[in-house]
């Protein structure tokens, strides 16, 4: 099995992720805007912000991941590239995974890297734990993008399918968001939550590519 089609799909998706000049800037703006607006809406009490901060950031991360998902497969469907990808010797699941991973690296990973700064706005302590939490956001974001990729594949033939992607993906995001928020708490549940968060990401990596491949084959028929 040649890796060339998969690598080509990965490189193409990296280029497409910046198409139109938006790239990672739009999800970053959404993510940052949430962190700025929430304290304005609920007040500036440090205890309150510290308590709700992790949950708010996980919700913002989930919603921000939806912003660019519509691009992953739609252009390939419109210009006929999808049919060519499906005719290569590479499995459709590996093509789908490569394109989704490229979009995560372009738009999702910057969100995780930005999270320590935003956590400070919710009165989080400036410590090494912020870097650990950034790793949690990266793991959770990877799961979000792969589950979102399923929605993107199912709506690949739908014009302006962002709403459909949201309806499909958001229920799949729930376990990851719960485990991610728990991982940032100093509770007994928080001690095991990182393992559950990692397990949810691995499950997404194992299942979502095959679901995307099945949806893309339907879109190509």
Image: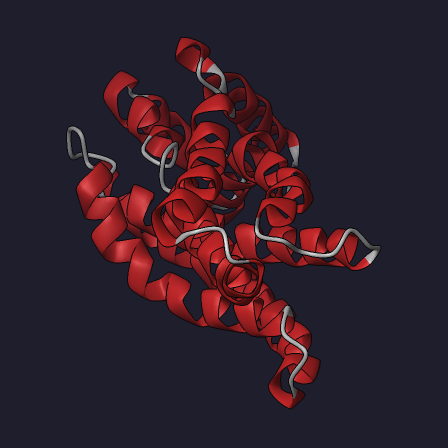
Could you say where residue 159 lies in the image, as x and y percent from the top left? 15, 28
Residue found at the far top of this picture: 21
Left or right relative to 110: residue 174: left
Give the residue displayed 67% in from the left and 83% down from the top. Answer: 192
Could you say where residue 9 lies in the image, as x and y percent from the top left? 53, 28
Image position of 159 with respect to 129: above or below: above
Give the residue displayed 67% in from the left and 73% down from the top. Answer: 194
Quarter of the image where the N terminus is located? top right
Quarter of the image where the C terminus is located? top left
Could you say where residue 39 lies in the image, as x and y percent from the top left? 44, 47
The reply to whether residue 119 is in sight is yes
Image position of 136 with respect to 80: above or below: below
Residue found at the far right of this picture: 128
Give the residue displayed 35% in from the left and 32% down from the top. Answer: 73
Left or right relative to 147: residue 133: right
The number of numbered discs placed on residues in the rendered structure image is: 0
Give the residue displayed 59% in from the left and 45% down from the top. Answer: 121
Image position of 115 with respect to 88: above or below: below
Residue found at the far bottom of this picture: 188
The reply to whether residue 213 is in sight is no
């Amino acid at each position: 099995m040649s890796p060339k089609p998969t690598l080509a799909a990965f490189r193409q998706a990296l280029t497409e992720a910046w198409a139109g000049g938006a790239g990672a800037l739009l999800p970053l703006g959404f993510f940052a805007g949430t962190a700025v607006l929430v304290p304005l809406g609920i007040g500036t009490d440090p205890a309150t912000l510290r308590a709700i901060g992790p949950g708010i950031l996980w919700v913002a991360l989930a919603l921000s991941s939806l912003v660019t998902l519509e691009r992953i497969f739609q252009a390939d469907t419109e210009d006929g590239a999808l049919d060519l990808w499906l005719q290569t010797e590479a499995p459709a699941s590996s093509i789908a995974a490569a394109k989704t991973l490229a979009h995560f690296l372009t738009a999702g990973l910057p969100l995780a890297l930005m999270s320590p700064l935003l956590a400070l706005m919710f009165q989080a302590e400036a410590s090494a734990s912020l870097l650990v939490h950034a790793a949690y956001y990266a793991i959770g974001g990877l799961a979000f993008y792969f589950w979102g990729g399923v929605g993107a594949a199912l709506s690949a033939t739908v014009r302006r399918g962002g709403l459909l992607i949201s309806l499909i993906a958001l229920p799949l995001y729930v376990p990851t968001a719960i485990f991610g928020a728990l991982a940032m708490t100093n509770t007994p549940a928080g001690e095991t939550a990182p393992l559950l968060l990692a397990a949810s990401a691995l499950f997404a990596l194992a299942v979502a590519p095959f679901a995307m491949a099945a949806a893309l084959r339907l879109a190509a028929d």
